[in-house]
Image (tube, rainbow, N blue to C red):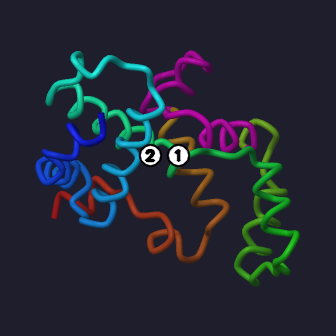
Amino acid sequence: MLEELSKNDKMWREVAYRFTNNRDSADELVQEMYLRLLDSKVDIKKINSNYIKITLYHLFKSSKKNLYKTISLDEYKETVTKDNVFDYTDRDVQILSEINKLSEEEKRLLNLNYEFSVGKISNIDEECVMKTHRKLIKIRKKVLKKGFETEYKNTRLKYQR
C-alpha cells in the first residue's frame, strides 16, 4: 500500500505545503498521513487522490487545534507560579488597588467583560449596548486614571485614521 502511495509523494508534499506554507511542516504532515493510512484498515482501492487530500487537510486542522488548546485559569496559575517568581509592577499594584475601590456593580461589569462581549452583557443586564459600553469605558478610566489613552486604545479610532 505504501509503495502505491509513495509514487505520488511529491504531489502529497505540495498539497501539504499549500496548507502549511512551510516545507518542514508539510513533510511532517505527509509522514503523519502515511502512518495514519498504514494504521487504518482502508482498502487500497478506495484510496484516491481526493481521499489523500482530505486526509491531509484533516491532519492539518487537527494539528492546528492542538496548538491552540486552552487550559483552565487554575492550571495556568500553577504553571506560572510554580517555576517563576511573579512580581507585580508598581502600575499593577496601583490598578489592583483601584479595582478594589470599585463598587460591587462595577466589579461585576468588569468581570463580565472578560468573559462576554458588550452585546452579551447588555442582554444580561437588559440595557442598551451603548449604555453598557459607556459604563465599561467609565470603569476603565476610573481604574487606569493616568495613562488611560495609552493603555486602552479604542481600536475603531486607531483604524479610522
Q: Nearer the viewer, residue 83 or 58?
A: 58
Q: Quadrant of the N terminus?
A: top left
Task: Give left or right: position of 66 versus 91.
Answer: left
What range of the chain is rendered magenta? 107-131
Determine which quarter of the picture holds residue 143.
bottom right
Q: Nearer the viewer, residue 130 or 65?
A: 65
Circle 2 packing at 10 Å, graded few (<14), some (14-19), many (20+), is: few
* 131 in relation to 77, above or below: above
Q: Which residue is mark 2?
A: 63
Q: Which residue is mark 1?
A: 66
- The reply to whether dot 2 and dot 1 touch (C-beta < 8 Å) is yes
- Residue 132 percent location from the top left of the image: 52, 33
Name which residue type carries label 2.
Ser
SS type, badge 1: helix
Tag on residue 9?
Answer: none
SS type, badge 2: helix
> Is residue 127 magenta-colored?
yes
